[in-house]
Image (cartoon, rainbow, N blue to C red):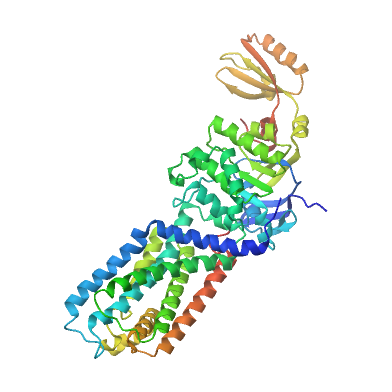
Amino acid sequence: MIIPASFKQSVRGPWTLLKKELLRFWRVAFQTVAAPVITALLYLLIFSHVLEKQVQVYDDVPYTAFLIPGLIMMSVLQNAFANSSSSLIQSKVMGNLVFILLTPLTHLQFFTAFLFAAIIRGLVVGLCIYLVAICFIAMPMANPGLIVAFALLGSALLGTFGIIAGIWADRFDQMAAFQNFVIMPLSFLSGVFYSIHSLPPFWQKVSHLNPFFYMIDGFRYGFFGKGDVSPLVSLSVVGLSFLLLAWITLKMLKSGYKLRA
Amino acid sequence: MTHPAIKINGVHKYFGNLHALKGVDLTIAPGEFFALLGPNGAGKSTLISILAGLIKPTTGDVSVMGFDVVNQYQQARQLLGIVPQELVFDPFFNVREMLRFQAGYFGYGRENDAWIDEILEGLGLTDKAHTNMRKLSGGMKRRALIAQALAHKPPVIVLDEPTAGVDVELRQMLWSFIKKLNQNGHTIILTTHYLEEAEALCSRVAMMKQGEIVALDSTANLLNKFSGKHLRLTLGDVALPLGLQALLRHQEKGIFTFALRDTEQIELVLSALRLANIKVLDMQLSEADLEDVFLSLTGKQS
């Protein structure tokens, strides 16, 4: 019997898991891509219609244009989280996670595959919203490097958070609680629809504790060249948050927390 | 030096206060067809989960072909194919996709397709290759589960209750397929509740009870050790003489089954019945089987 070289396994193993995770969301693209794009566009339609003439956040930026990067980033983050978390909780509840646990995949390979699948889903959804939005309104692009950096880091951060939630939750209602009581409030209270400068000082301070604020502000900075805080501060906060969560996730996976007894 | 297919050395496992495995030692040679028997809660599935890396032993070590399942888990899992007891499946994919994914996790690509075709053929799944997993019947799902464990052509295959809830025809088909794998050099370890299967297929048997191995021998030796006869008498609704109670193994609807040491004891039973004026309506004599060994060792009454 031929045992494949470990090099072959170490490349093909995680690549196969990534492929499987990508196919998993692509098979139900109506639900995983089309639905969030439509939701974001509805937000855009309603908020821009109601607030376009009443809110001016930056002097030379119309409200609709201001709103677009926030909505894109919010969708990127929510979908990156949904991808890894829903895949894991479904596999746990259905019991088919065992097919992966029985393989030679290391905790790092497991993490990498789930992480990249989450990033790709987040970016696909974000890109679709962007492409539809620019059909209706011209969007500047002051710093494309920052746009890419925040999209990648933001989706990576939430993809990692999704892995933690997926490992921790044992039931679908626990996962729903995570979505509704953590992800939704953090994303809605992060400056998607407004600049935090329009908030009272206390809530401005609170907003600074929300990592979603830095992801959205930094991403928006990439389009308009201006934001509520320096993009370097945002990049540092997001980067360090990702490293911290990645470290926690790898620890959980290595110890087999809730996956191996 | 050839390593044993499986080596289990002094394995203890605690789940809180529950001492699930109490120092299990077991060596299985390459190419063996081995049965692990025991009542529910004996520790069979815990032992298999340790082998699979799903559970860590509290103390002791386990290796697959010389590779430790904890410290060298990548190599150990590469050599191991496990068929889980529960009928689990991924509803997003069809059978062939699942097999390709499973092989891919172990480092195999399209070059493995010929082997996948062979498994599909051997398990009667060829015409279901493009059927979504959730659309398969229970029996077909069971076959797909076995196919998944074999996708990376592991030399050591563990089947945890593979025929539970499977009809007779499919059971026969699965066993002839697994027998063929064994003839081709794969080591097979199975847990089963169908003792006649273990008796017919396995060269060696371990019986577990309350976290310990209570018997470990070749199937033939175990049967010899517990050799004896079964005398099945149809007597109707009668009160059995007290002297025969010790030999009585089972009683149902006027049919009494006695466990005898040898044929000489037949006369003893019959004369006791004559003395008590009990008429024998029908009589059958049979050899002891693995079930008797199992029952006498695990202390269970049939």
Query: In the drawing, does residue A204 fall left or right of residue A93?
Result: left
Residue B284's quadrant in the figure?
A: top right
Above or below B23: residue B229: above
Query: Which quarter of the rendered picture does the C terminus of chain A lie within?
Result: bottom right
Query: In the drawing, does residue A39 fall left or right of residue A155?
Result: left
A121 vs B117, nearest the viewer: B117
Above or below B129: residue A222: below
Q: How many marks?
A: 0
**Res A183 seen here:** no
Residue B82 image position (x, y, % from top left): 61, 49
Extreme residue toward the right, this view = B1
Residue B52's quadrant in the figure?
A: bottom right
Residue A63 image position (x, y, % from top left): 23, 82
| Residue drawn at point x = 67 percent, y = 37 percent | B180
| Residue drawn at point x = 67 percent, y = 35 percent | B198
Residue B280 image position (x, y, % from top left): 64, 10
B229 vs A42, nearest the viewer: A42
**Res A166 seen here:** yes
Above or below A139: residue A23: above
B31 vs B286, nearest the viewer: B31
Query: In the drawing, does residue B30 fall left or right of residue B143?
Result: right
Query: In the drawing, does residue A37 fall left or right of residue B92?
Result: left
Residue B261's quadrant in the figure?
A: top right
Residue A123 image position (x, y, % from top left): 40, 71
